[in-house]
């Protein structure tokens, strides 16, 4: 169903200006608060935020495929840098009967906190929805922290502050654009947290990331775009106006569970290897990078005869692709 926005040239220009800010953000030392009013937040929520939501859906679907569930001790969700609240909105749909007692939306922008809290409250009538400025956010082991698309906007000092705030959380779900810049910063976060937290996803191991020092490779994946991207003329027009490819949804992400409270992580993954990025298809075979349970990232040659079913699936973006050493689809 078409979102019906933007409706005017002024709204188009507002969204184009936002996109330019986002594109320029990695080269800046921090980014100013750009939420002018509720109207701009509404425009963003109906457009750019949907694309982020599609990425969150892919991440949450992978967690479900892995057999992971929100731990029973979680009583509060904290959406740090909430923007329009898309991360929490998507998690609400995923969590179903595992909703917390309280949802806290936190952002440097009071306008963003007000917008997201008013949007989310009707979705969770039995849950308290509150706001909190980032500098006042304190976490504990009963908290699940959601972080989404913030690394391009945080100076190093801001990242240091955020790390200190989330160090004691029970669960962290962190989703970023799948760019080399964001991937590298997220790998730095992983390196600092891996001794305190169990790594739930995307890694099939708990060791140091083999891509931390690899030139030209970065940890990223491609979420499948929803059918509406190809079916609704609104999205085709929006993509053209914003010069954005809605068919390509690169993602870097990290899901962590505090060692102090984590139970046994889902079994069956210890001998698996997970696809990074996309396979490169050649005649009769494909080359792909996999991260394995030994903590290595290797390029593997996959013969089509052995992976007939997988090749058909890989013709479209399959976000969560894992193989075992003895897998054979014949």
Image: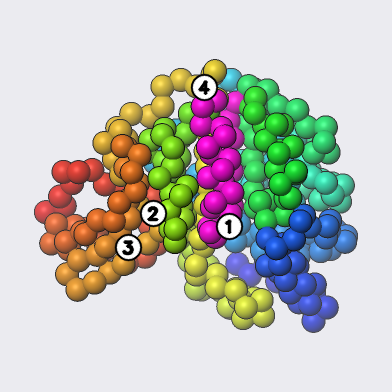
Looking at marks 1 and 2 on the same chain, the residue that comes earlier in the sequence is marked by: 1
Badge nearest the viewer, 1 or 3 = 1
Crowding near pointer 1: few (<14 within 10 Å), some, many (20+)? few
- Residue 276's label in the rendered image is 2
Regarding residue 56, the answer to whether it shows in the image is no
Regarding residue 301, the answer to whether it shows in the image is yes
Q: Quadrant of the C terminus?
A: bottom left
Helix, strand or loop under label 2 = strand
Which residue occupies the foreground of this view, 288 or 64? 288
Residue 183: say if magenta: yes
Which residue occupies the foreground of this view, 96 or 259? 259
Whole-Å distance between the Cαs marked 1 and 2? 16 Å
Residue numbers of the magenta segment:
170-196
Residues at discs 2 and 4 in contact (Cβ within 8 Å): no
Q: Which residue is mark 3?
A: 279
Looking at marks 4 and 1 on the same chain, the residue that comes earlier in the sequence is marked by: 1
- Residue 259's label in the rendered image is 4
Helix, strand or loop under label 4 = loop
Crowding near pointer 2: few (<14 within 10 Å), some, many (20+)? many
Establish if 119 lies above or below 40: above
Whole-Å distance between the Cαs marked 4 and 1? 28 Å
Helix, strand or loop under label 1 = helix
Which residue occupies the foreground of this view, 153 or 28? 28
Q: Is residue 244 left or right of residue 218?
A: right
Q: Position of residue 120 (x, y in %)?
A: 73, 44
Whole-Å distance between the Cαs marked 3 and 2? 8 Å
Helix, strand or loop under label 3 = strand
Residue under the point 63% across and 31% down: 144
Which quarter of the figure has residue 78? top right
Q: Which residue is mark 1?
A: 181
Residue under the point 55% across and 25% down: 196
């Amino acid at each position: 169903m078409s979102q019906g926005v933007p409706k005017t040239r002024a709204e188009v220009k507002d969204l184009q200006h936002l996109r330019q800010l986002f594109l320029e953000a990695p080269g800046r030392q921090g980014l100013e608060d750009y939420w002018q009013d509720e109207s701009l937040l509404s425009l963003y929520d109906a457009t750019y935020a949907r694309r982020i939501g599609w990425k969150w859906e892919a991440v949450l679907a992978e967690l479900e495929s892995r057999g992971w569930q929100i731990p029973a001790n979680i009583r509060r969700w904290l959406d740090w840098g909430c923007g329009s609240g898309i991360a929490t909105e998507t998690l609400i749909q995923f969590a179903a009967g595992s909703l917390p007692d309280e949802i806290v939306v936190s952002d440097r922008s009071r306008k963003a906190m007000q917008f997201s809290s008013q949007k989310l409250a009707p979705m969770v009538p039995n849950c308290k929805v509150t706001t909190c400025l980032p500098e006042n956010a304190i976490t504990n082991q009963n908290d699940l922290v959601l972080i989404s698309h913030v690394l391009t906007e945080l100076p190093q000092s801001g990242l240091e502050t955020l790390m200190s705030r989330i160090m004691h959380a029970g669960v962290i779900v962190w989703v970023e654009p799948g760019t080399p810049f964001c991937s590298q910063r997220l790998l730095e976060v992983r390196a600092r947290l891996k001794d305190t937290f169990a790594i739930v996803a995307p890694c099939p191991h708990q060791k140091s990331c083999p891509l931390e020092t690899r030139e030209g490779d970065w940890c990223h994946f491609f979420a499948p775009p929803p059918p509406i991207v190809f079916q609704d003329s609104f999205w085709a027009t929006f993509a053209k106006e914003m010069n954005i490819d809605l068919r390509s949804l690169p993602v870097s992400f990290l899901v962590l569970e505090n060692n102090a409270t984590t139970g046994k992580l889902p079994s069956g993954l210890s001998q698996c290897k997970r696809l990074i990025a996309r396979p490169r298809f050649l005649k009769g075979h494909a080359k792909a990078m996999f991260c394995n349970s030994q903590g290595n990232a290797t390029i593997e040659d996959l013969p089509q005869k052995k992976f007939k079913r997988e090749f058909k699936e890989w013709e479209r973006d399959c976000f969560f692709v894992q193989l075992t050493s003895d897998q054979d689809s014949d």
